[in-house]
């Protein structure tokens, strides 16, 4: 690896790759650039599984703790993929630039950040962290490019969209207007309020109808997936967005589950396009205005909204990018490790941290942190209906939901990156002790980074062109390492339906479980504002 090249290390999750990323950077005088959408926020530590201060002192980390959690619901999505990509390119450029060589994208970066107070404050934070990590004093900042040593940026993280933008380029979706953002948020909230009101009326009617009847108390834990009002709101909102035109129907159909954030983004794009293409003459009535907007959106083609052209990727800027996906060689063992990590996060105080963020207003609806796995399930548990003290079943139910959501995200990452031909799959030996596991994966990455750009591309091309679709006819023995790892990972997926979760530390009745339960009761009381009778 030489000047103007960098290694991009991609993870399954924080269990198996943060240590590998740090080992790799330590061996190559490198810095970690975080590609984690939650680690960017200050005060969001346990749920984001942030590196410790000692780890960051040994290996400099960038884009960690650069923004405050939004307390204004209207700015719930204040730090997004575009912001991160701009920040990541800036950090990478600063770490790899010499003699004032700041790259061809400097003007674009400055233009996009001008006039935005949040962006300017964030940039100051990032620059300060860069100077500290490079040992540059305030008086020497102007000479940073001529005094700093060779640095290898290693991008490590699990936010798939961030990595896709950095490696493949930013998509061409138009930037929404402030009016469109506000209007889209109002429309989504309207659907949610209507659904909540309807569900409340139906629940009241059901309760009245059941008076006098003997029924057992329902102890089912209410989750986001089972929330009737959320399901009803999503059905109404997604139907509305789909009705705007064929282009939006196709996009809604591709959304994974009830992805409110991306549904709102579609609505922002629709409203922005409609506002920019309205006739210059004023309509005679509100109805005429709505008809005009409807016609504009209905007649849109895919290419008018999304050309499919991406721009601004690191390869476009001249970087030699090496992408790796750290893949567990044994998925059953990996999922058990995921479950144990979820237990450890609860023992470290995830519920306490969630309650504290909620009290400070740091968990507004639809914010990146609120939607993050761990915080979302914790907040739903702390806000559960008919909460009572010492409820073992409720805590165990929450743990099951939290662990299942984490495992599901790990599965989604595997599926996503198996389809990305730019990523080489590196097997991580889950049965080995930590030192050997980390060292083995780091060595494989180092060996592949020593390949010339042509040979590395050949390795990826072999993986992409060989039969790695999981068919039994392909034994995989003659395939390159990455292709064999992908094939084995996909085949193991067929057996995962037999996976059984098991507790390691938080076993019902154990001291650790009772300690977490007591903390959970206090956090529930705080979040719901319950009195001493709770």
Image (cartoon, rainbow, N blue to C red):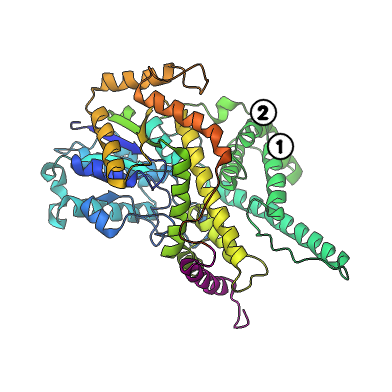
Residue assigned mark 2: 299
- The answer to which image quadrant residue 6 occupies is top left
Q: Residue at x 29, y 23 (%)?
A: 456
Q: Which residue is drawn at 74% across and 43% down?
A: 284
Look at the picture and state if 327 lies above or below 399. Answer: above
Report the Cα–Cα distance between label 2 and label 1: 12 Å
Which residue is at the front of the view, 402 or 274?
Answer: 402
- Where in the figure is residue 459, as x and y percent of width and height? 33, 21
Nearer to us of marks 2 and 1 is 1
What range of the chain is rendered magenta?
Answer: 508-534
Which residue is at the front of the view, 326 or 127?
Answer: 326
Which residue is at the front of the view, 394 or 75?
Answer: 394
In magenta segment, residue 510:
yes
Residue assigned mark 1: 243
* Residue 514 numbered mark, or none: none
Q: Which residue is drawn at 76% across and 58% down?
A: 199
Secondary structure of the residue carrying tag 2 is loop
């Amino acid at each position: 690896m030489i000047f103007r090249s960098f290694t991009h290390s991609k993870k399954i999750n924080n269990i198996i790759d943060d240590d590998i990323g740090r080992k790799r950077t330590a061996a190559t005088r490198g810095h970690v650039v975080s590609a984690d959408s939650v680690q960017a926020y200050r005060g969001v530590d346990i749920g984001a599984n942030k590196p410790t201060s000692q780890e960051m002192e040994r290996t400099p980390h960038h884009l960690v703790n650069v923004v405050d959690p939004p307390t204004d619901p209207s700015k719930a999505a204040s730090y997004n993929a575009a912001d991160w990509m701009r920040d990541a390119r800036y950090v990478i450029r600063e770490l790899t630039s010499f003699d004032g060589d700041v790259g061809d994208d400097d003007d674009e970066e400055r233009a996009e950040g001008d006039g935005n107070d949040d962006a300017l404050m964030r940039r100051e934070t990032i620059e300060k962290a860069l100077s500290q990590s490079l040992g540059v004093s305030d008086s020497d900042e102007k000479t940073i490019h001529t005094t700093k040593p060779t640095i290898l940026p290693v991008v490590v993280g699990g936010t798939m969209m961030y990595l896709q933008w950095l490696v493949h380029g930013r998509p061409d979706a138009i930037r929404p207007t402030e009016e469109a953002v506000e209007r889209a948020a109002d429309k989504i909230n309207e659907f949610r309020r209507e659904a909540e009101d309807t569900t409340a009326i139906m629940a009241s009617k059901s309760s009245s109808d059941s008076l006098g009847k003997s029924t057992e108390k329902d102890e089912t834990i209410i989750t986001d997936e089972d929330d009737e009002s959320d399901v009803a709101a999503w059905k109404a909102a997604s139907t509305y967005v789909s009705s705007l035109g064929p282009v939006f129907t196709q996009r809604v159909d591709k959304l994974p589950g009830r992805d409110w954030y991306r549904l709102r983004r579609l609505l922002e794009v629709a409203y922005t396009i409609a506002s920019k293409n309205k006739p210059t003459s004023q309509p005679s009535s509100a109805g005429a205005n709505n008809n005009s907007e409807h016609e504009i959106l209905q007649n849109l083609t895919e290419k008018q909204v999304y050309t499919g052209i991406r721009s601004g990727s690191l390869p476009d800027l001249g970087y030699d990018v090496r992408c790796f996906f750290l893949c567990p060689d044994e998925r059953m063992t990996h999922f058990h490790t995921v479950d144990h990590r979820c237990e450890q996060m609860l023992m470290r105080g995830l519920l306490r941290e969630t309650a504290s963020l909620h009290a400070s207003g740091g968990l507004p609806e639809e914010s990146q942190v609120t939607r993050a796995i761990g915080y979302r399930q914790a907040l739903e548990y702390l806000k559960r209906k008919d909460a009572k003290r010492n409820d073992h079943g409720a805590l165990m139910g929450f743990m099951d939901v939290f662990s299942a959501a984490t495992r599901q995200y790990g599965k989604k990452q595997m599926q996503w990156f198996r389809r990305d031909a730019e990523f080489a799959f590196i097997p991580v030996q889950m049965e080995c002790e930590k030192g050997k596991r980390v060292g083995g994966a780091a060595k494989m990455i180092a060996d592949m980074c020593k390949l010339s750009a042509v040979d590395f591309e050949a390795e990826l091309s072999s993986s992409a062109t060989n039969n790695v679709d999981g068919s039994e006819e392909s034994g995989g023995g003659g395939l390159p390492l990455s292709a064999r790892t992908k094939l084995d990972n996909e085949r193991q997926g067929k057996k995962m339906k037999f996976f059984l979760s098991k507790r390691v530390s938080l076993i019902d009745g154990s001291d650790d479980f009772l300690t977490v339960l007591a903390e959970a009761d206090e956090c529930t009381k705080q979040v719901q504002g319950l009195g001493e009778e709770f």
